[in-house]
Amino acid sequence: MIKIHETSAANVDSASDRLQALGLALPELRENPYYVHHRTVGSSIYISGQLPYRDGWLLGQGTVGRDIDLETARSFAHDAVLNCLAAAVQAVGDLDRVRIVQMLVFVASTPDFGEQSQVANAASELLIEVLGENGRHARTAIGVAGLPLNSPVEIQMVITAA
């Protein structure tokens, strides 16, 4: 059973309205000279791995299970998925047209951490609350030795336009 945020936005009409009802907004993504935030191939849109940035700042660094606790890592996953949604909107033009196909969650964690799926659940919960059925997705959560900029979490997606 998926636990949805206590501040339910389920009765609000559009995905953008549900996001706003949660007190959230999609961030602006900075351009990067080395990669694009999304690439379309056929009907699939690939979203580049996104880190937990907010207002241009990486929210934390370290390894989950050693430097970062589970709840903080879940918070970072929440911010990383907002960045993914921002890239998705760049690709399809409107949040109501975003349909998540697959999400891959990387968690820089100690070998004995074992709760990568709990970190990923924070992102999945937000996607379902904001996008409804379009937010349901296939998912993999993987523990890794390290991520770019020593980020604790990175999220990558495959989406389509609904």
Image (cartoon, helix red, strand yellow):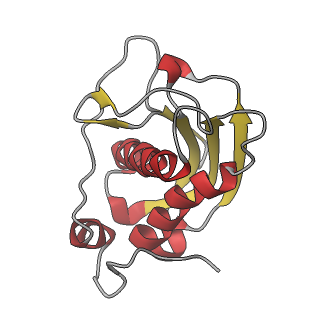
Depth order, front residue of 113/8: 113
Relative horizontal placement of residue 78, taking residue 148 as reference (left or right): left
Q: How many marks?
A: 0
Quadrant of the image for the N terminus? bottom right
Residue extending farthest top: 33
Q: Is residue 61 visible?
A: yes
Residue at x-position 49% and y-position 53%: 71
Depth order, front residue of 69/52: 69
Residue 33 drawn at (x, y percent): 38, 11
Residue 82 drawn at (x, y percent): 38, 49
Q: Is residue 64 above or below residue 133?
A: above
Question: Dividing the picture into quarters, in which one does residue 121 lie?
Answer: bottom right
Relative horizontal placement of residue 100, taking residue 60 as reference (left or right): right
Q: Is residue 47 visible?
A: no
Residue at x-position 22% and y-position 35%: 55
Question: Dividing the picture into quarters, in which one does residue 12 lie?
Answer: bottom left
Residue at x-position 53% and y-position 77%: 3
Residue 131 drawn at (x, y percent): 43, 69
Q: Is residue 68 above or below residue 17?
A: above
Relative horizontal placement of residue 76, taking residue 31 as reference (left or right): right
Residue at x-position 33% and y-position 69%: 15
Residue extending farthest bottom: 11
Residue 157 drawn at (x, y percent): 57, 45
